[in-house]
Image (tube, helix red, strand yellow):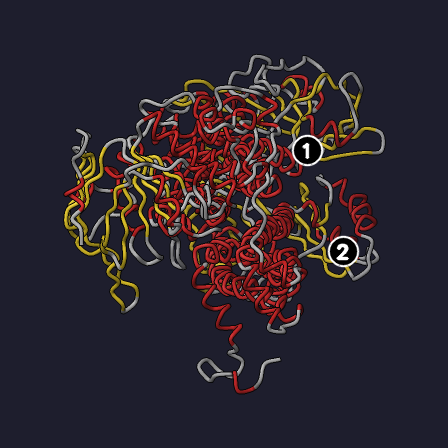
Amino acid sequence: MRGRRDRRNLCGEFMTTLYRKLLRELVHMRGQATAIALVIACGVASFVAMRSMYRSLLRSQAEYYTQYRFADVFCELKRAPNGAADRVREIAGVAQVEPRVVMDVTMDVPGLKEPAVGRLISIAPKQTRGLNTLFLRRGRYVLPESDNEVIASEAFAKANQLEPGSQIHAVINGRWQKLTIVGIALSPEYIYEIRGGSSVFPDNKRFGVLWMSADALESALNMKGAFNSIVVSLQPHTNEADVIAQMDRILDRYGSLGAYGRSDQISHRFISDEIAQNRISATVIPAIFLVVAALLVHLSFSRLVDMQRSEIAVIKAFGYSNWQVGIHYVQFSLLVAAAGYILGCAVGFYFGIRLASLYAEFYRFPILIYRPELRTFLWAGLITAVTAVAGAAVAVRRAVSLPPAEAMRPEAPAQFRSRIVDRLNVKWISPALRMMLRNLERRPWRALASAFAICCSIMMVVVEFGMLDSLDRVMELQFRDVQREDITVTLNEAHSAQARFDLAHLTGVIRSEPFRAVPVRLRYQHRWRKTTLLGLERDSELRLIVDQNGNRIPIPPNGILISSTLANLLHVAPGQRLSVELLEGRRTVHELLLTGTVDDVLGTSAYMNLYALNRLMEEDHSVSGALLQVDPDKEKKLYLQLKRLPAVAAVSVKNAVVTSFKETIDRSMNLSIGTLMVFAIVIAMGMIYNGARIALSERARELATLRVLGFSRHEITFILLGEQALITLAALPFGFVAGYALCAVLAARLQTELFRMPLVVRPASYAWAFLIVLFAAVASGILVSRRIARLDMVSVLKARE
Amino acid sequence: MHTASINSVEEGREVVFHVRSVSKSYQTGDVLIMALRSVELDLNAGEFVVFLGPSGSGKSTLLNILGGLDSPTSGDVRFRDHWLSEADDAGLTRFRREHVGFVFQFYNLIPSLTALENVALVTEIAENPMDPQEALRRVGLTERQNHFPSQLSGGEQQRVAIARAIAKNPDILLCDEPTGALDFPTAKLVLDVLARINEELHTLVAVITHNTAIGAMADRVIRLRSGEIVEVTRNARKARPEELVW
């Protein structure tokens, strides 16, 4: 036992000699310790950043919904008298009901050459305790008597640099009207601000929500005393499905498109999916790091204990107990882990802020304050400590279990036996390669651990780039194979065939194909889904319906085609008849033959022949809009015309959508690609560098001998690093396969009604993974080769081992 | 003190090593250690030389400089047309690779390679090597060629080390305490191999040892003390290893 007198005051009370030994060894092992600390830091950083982000999002969402009274049930309809809202109010369990007027209109936004789509929503005269309350960021509320004041959504205002006082123009009910923005606001209904339908990506430049005084909007749209949208909040413990069913019964006759709950509300759905995803990544990525860290600690400490056999024996011979020796090594490991933990917390905190600002841009929370919780850091600390102790445990147990006398003796020479390498009996294998192979064979677990880490690193890169490949493929499928038009013009209501000729004769239109879009409820047995039934001409060239392989599927003269996702949800197969309930016009129900399914990637849809749909609707060649192919030289003129056409409700310019989508992806992906690349490099480098350092330490004598025998520095570097290179090469295919498999899992998980991820990993993605691991390997090699240069041939040869 | 150069040219043998006023000092901490002080020495082709001296006499330092493992602080070392004292790391590596065979006290075999492969490792990078099996035959280990070092006795390991050293047909065989870790009968076996190599292949063999008995089998015995050559003796008759006693 140590006496008090031994303690020096150099570094405080507890600075015993063993502590000094520990610190000096730490300095000596700084390269390896740094590698381990960095891997731990990455794990802690990703855990802290993602976990606290997840918690923040969850809390922000919940708080926002409560404070701003986000509705529970929503319903759009054609037109209902206010009395219908009173009947909804009487449904048991309904807390609050708010009828309103919502209308999509074409807008001319200053500085934007394409027409934009504005969603006008009526709001109560003054800020009452209504549902979906606005959070006014800047400016003021609309005056009840004003007929041209609007509050603009923040995302839209920001994208177009609109401020209170800015003016925009819109065609409202056929009239060209000037609107003045008086305020900028956020709404819980549009945290994720998209139009819905097939446009699932935010295009904040060309789609915005504008809130207008109810009086003004109702008169502009001739909706006095009526509503076309209703939002409802429920009392606690109310059965949502019952309320929905009763609302449908009341509102059906007013052209209801069917009531739906939050889970089908598009913004809520996206946010919730995103939050859920955060939770998964907040578990998986840190787990990978901490497993690798534990392996690294294990490998490094096993070597340390081997090297310190005799020291351990001496310490124990002096009378230190197993417990004290064990604690000594565990402290060593904990110290390294603590360094990684502190760094990881700092980096995680920083990345949490970066992530938060990224999310703030994407999702409009009024109060997305990044508040990391103490318990996140405590959890991270606990997990780190467990990792460090678990990693060191085996080595430490070996250290303490050695009887002093045995530990004083040098370790027995490495035993090699002819195994796999020799059974192959291949003559051309050089002795250098044999050395590498036999060394790997002798410590298969170590090789496997290294390979596992490299595998993880490759997998991360493949998945990240694979996801991008899939997104690219989505773009290709949707915007090259399927949507071949330049512009989609949607009319504010179905027009006669005349409209089709008018559209065809606009400036710059090369080809025009009319379409009819009718909201429908598809039903098969007890299952049903709402979607849009799109009527297309038989020889449509601008909207192709293609299968998975890009082959065209002809539109049947009478039957119906639906998305395969929809077919799966309804449990219906081609050849069966399904019931189609038209939610427009006379709202008739029809039994139609399902002739095939379409492997589309965005949203869910149903297709049929335009004229067959007209017949079902009992109308004469009506169209909802047209797909246009446009002469690029004349598109500016065309946009000007479209912005002022009274019949036009929405104009969607394909290239603008594509560009906006790509920008969004780039913005959000840059951070994550950058981060994951750093992560992948840290893992690969941590493992390769440590592996090489351990090998160098174990085989310094062997390598020095080779130098003496006339091998050059490069040759022995090759022999030492060749082993790591072999492990890396062996790990590559597994990493590729694991990456592909994880892509497949993610693609399957991301199959939603809104969005399908095709499983695509391009060769370039594998190449990236390879390059990143190669970079890590070469960088580690350079670091280690500096040590090889310092190898002291003379002294190594003198020593016995 | 004898001047070694006096004994250098004899029987028409070529002088291959020229060592002129070679000094070597090490700075260890605050202490400057003079390992070699102005050493003058010539070594002839095909000679068997034994360096004797207690530890710290500078014999290992001299051997390291002759073998191109170390460079002198001052003075010149020349092997034929190689100026070792001026060579850089790459130059010394080339010199070792082309001309020198080393035998160490602790054998320093590569544990992951069999006896034959340990030899082949060197023949692969040599310019004019002998067949690895031939090298093993010369040390009498043909039967053990597929064994790993951990499966061989100390003497066998040292013989593999000698086979590895001679397999490149070196001009010089430098042996640092080759029998230091071996028992008496095994040591004699190893020395016998060295003597035969010297005779059959006419390789210059330099052995450093503190075992004076081994001096009897040399052409010349060079004694060092405190970094200086203090005595050079020439044996009229080289003893056979089996005659040695210690």
Q: CA–CA distance between discs 2 and 1?
A: 28 Å
Q: What residue type is labelled 1?
A: Thr
* Vertical side of A307 occupied by A551: above or below: above
Which residue is depicted at the point 55% across and 30% down? A733
Determine whether label 2 and label 1 are within 8 Å by CB. Answer: no
Image mark 1: chain: A
Secondary-structure class at tag 1: strand
Asked if A103 appears above or below A68 in the picture, the reply is above
Q: Earlier in the sequence, mark 2 or mark 1?
A: 2
Q: Is residue A255 above or below residue A580?
A: below
Decide if residue A586 is in sight here.
yes
What residue sits 49% from the left and 69% below the top? Answer: A21
Could you tell me which chain the residue with mark 2 belongs to? Answer: A
Crowd tier of the residue under label 2, counting other residues whose Cα lies within 10 Å: few below 14, some 14–19, many 20 or above? few
Residue A86 shows which numbered tag?
2
Q: What residue type is labelled 2?
A: Asp
Neighbourhood count class around disc 1 (C-alpha, 10 Å): few under 14, some 14–19, many 20 upward: many
- Quadrant that contains the N terminus of chain A: bottom right
Most foreground residue, B80 or A69: B80
Relative image position of residue A610 (x, y in whole percent): 63, 19
Which residue is disc 1 drawn over? A531
The reply, left or right, for residue A106 in relation to residue A242 is left
| Mark sitting on residue A147 | none
Q: Which residue is drawn at 39% across and 53% down?
A: A162
Q: Which of A534 and A228 is in front in this view?
A: A534
